[in-house]
Amino acid sequence: MSASELKQRCDASGPTIYRRLEQLRERDLIEEQTRPDPESGHHKQVYAPNLRRVTVELVDGELRLEIDRREDMSDRFTRLIENI
């Protein structure tokens, strides 16, 4: 979604949305993509989760969080070549 779509859906102010997006981007939990906007004839920035899976467990009174991020195909290829 775009920041304006998130603003409407979350019923939050623009600065709050951009602050949260920056925090998520810093933690590599979302990725920013540029998409064409057929209505305006330009492009817009949209944000998508960079997650494959998030697991939250409570074990012996301790909260454990595991985040499995998506990996870009080019990064996977580089890792494959480096491990040969």
Image (tube, rainbow, N blue to C red):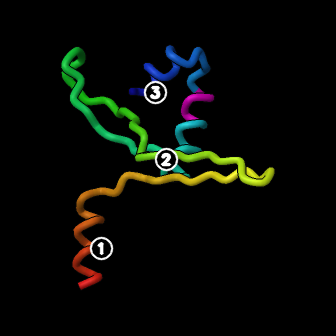
Which quarter of the rendered picture does the N terminus lie within?
Answer: top left
Task: Please state which of residues 16 and 81 is positioned toward the viewer in this rendering.
Answer: 81
State the residue position of label 2.
29
**Vertical side of 77 occupied by 40: above or below:** above
Q: Earlier in the sequence, mark 2 or mark 1?
A: 2
Q: Earlier in the sequence, mark 3 or mark 1?
A: 3
Local crowd size for mark 1, using a 10 Å CA cut-off: few (<14), some (14–19), many (≥20)? few
What segment is highlighted magenta in the picture?
Answer: 15-19
Element marked by disc 3:
helix
- Where disc 1 sits, the SS reads helix
Separation of residues labelled 3 and 2 (CA atoms)? 16 Å
The three-letter code of the residue at mark 3 reads Ala
Quadrant housing residue 79: bottom left
Q: Amino acid at mark 2?
A: Leu
Task: State the residue in front, 19 or 71.
Answer: 71
Q: Residue furthest front?
A: 60
Residue 59's spot in the image, x, y percent? 72, 53
